[in-house]
Amino acid sequence: MYYPEEVIEEVRSRADIVDVVGKVVHLKKMGANYFGLCPFHGEKTPSFSVNQSKQIFYCFGCGKGGDVVKFTMEYENLTFLEAVRKLADEEGYQLPEGNVSSEERQSRDLRTKLLEINKKAAVYFYDALRKPVGQLGMNYFRKRQLSDETLRVWGLGYADQTRDGLYRYLRQCGYEDAILRESGLVNFSERGAYDKFFNRVIFPIMDVNSRVIGFGGRVMGEGEPKYLNSPETRLFDKSRNLFGLCYAKKSRKKYFILCEGYMDVISMHQAGFTNAVASLGTALTEEQCRLLRRYVGEILLTYDSDGAGIKAAKRAMPMLKAVGIQSKVISMKPYKDPDEFIKAKGQEAFQERIDQAQNSFLWLIDVMKLDYDLKDPAGMTAYTNAAAEKLSEIQEAIERENYIQAVAREQMIDVNALRRLVNTMGEQRARRNSPLNEKMYQSTSFMPRTNPKKKVETALQKSEKQLVTWLSEKPELIPTVQKYIQPADISDETVRTVLELVYQQQPVNTILDRFREDEEAYEKVAAMFNGNLLPEDVDEREFKRGLEDVIRNVKMSSLNTKIANETDPRQLSELFRQQSALQGMHID
């Protein structure tokens, strides 16, 4: 699909970035820009900047940046075209029918048809539950104490025992076998076609925009598997979606409650805890963690209190922390899960458990006790060593000290002895992670993995980027700067291209579009247009000196490179002359 540039610009002009971002980020005006807490990574000090005049955003913390379309793509997990359509819909702008290749049209039509099929299937299952054929499913939901309103809101249904009832219905609706095969709702074999879901209560799975993208089914009576999800399709990727997110995001809560199963989520919403979500029949994934971070900065874990639930919580904690989400654990004991707890104790009791939710790290230290005999001095020593090893993994000194004191207090361990032990283990860890031992430990599974450090920018690279930033702020300087700096003088290829476009006085969004297919370059360019901006009360003489220094640094480096590669004496003489003149440069 392709929309002309003027159409994209029309969408951008109608969707003011401050209004769009302001719906999900609390922005405060500071000087020429607006600032708020970044929705893409965890932070306590606002580093997320929105420039209304240029209609771009940039986070000085995580480096994400771009225009209003890019923000919508990142926040809503949409493609470029989906983001354009969403913004156009919100602004009441009718998009024209663009130039569509046959391949693009085919892919778009396929997704549209699959959404239609899923919607019809959802209605089919919904109606079946309320007919005599669905009595078995209705009995199950009544036993689980779900109200008629809950059944309606969640679109719960039933797949009957006819084996091919849905298939025959969809064929009557005009869908061919080829598209039904793509839907994941029908299986095909030598014996013919039969429904994927059979004799199961049905839970429609919706994406963040409330579109049915798949289904989950629980078998009635005996049968395996107990729970069955739609297979991976063009619409459904269980690792990138969360059950109940389309409802939970409307709760406007600062935290979500993460559950294991569909019924846990539905029961909690029915009880008034409308910020509950669940992973889709699998362990929590990195993609799901990043999706959660777009909406909240804290997660309360309510995994089952059995061994599998504890294991799942242990796995989820570091993944959530990696994307900047703080986590706590809600104790369900003596009950197995939230659904069972709420039915037994009620809404107020569960709210008390939420209020008493334990810090996930302290919960983990508590759970570790299960692996040791604390009545045996040797067992207590082993447990203390294990707790100290966990504490030594905390890198930030103040955070580590706070946890040392908390663990010592709650586990009744001498705080000074624990601190010495943690510091010793921290030093050992540092030695193991030293470059000399990197190869020795690189295949050891228990060693923490660190991300490669970002490349340190040179003074020249900073000067080149600063030049673009200032010219974008003061385009009237372009003729003056062009006397000294040509794009060929720029060492960085991306900055060189941007400078050419700035000299042509191309709009910021047009320049950003040139780099849309290269994520790293795109964010680099966004940073240049939202870099170290000029204070409103900047001293003119001070700015002039700064600009002269930047021009001198960039040009001098370019001349040095040319001199190193030049062999013609006359050209060398000219280059040396230019260097000499550069020393006494003064800008009017």
Image (cartoon, rainbow, N blue to C red):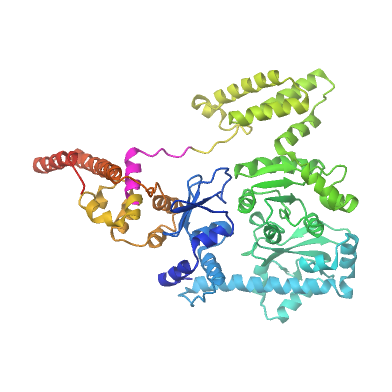
**Image x and y of residue 492, in percent:** 33, 47
Residue 192 appears in the picture as rendered: no
Residue at left offset 70%, top offset 35%: 361
Residue 266 appears in the picture as rendered: yes
Is residue 238 positioned above or below 404 on the image? below
Choose between 375 and 395: the one closer to the eye.
395
Image side of residue 576 versus residue 10, left or right: left
Q: Which residues are magenta?
A: 453-468
Residue at left offset 52%, top offset 76%: 94
Image side of residue 492 versus residue 374, left or right: left
Image side of residue 189 versus residue 48, left or right: right
Q: Residue furthest left?
A: 570
Choose between 365 and 285: the one closer to the eye.
365
**Image x and y of residue 286, in percent:** 62, 48
**Image x and y of residue 368, in percent:** 76, 31
Q: Quadrant of residue 252?
A: bottom right
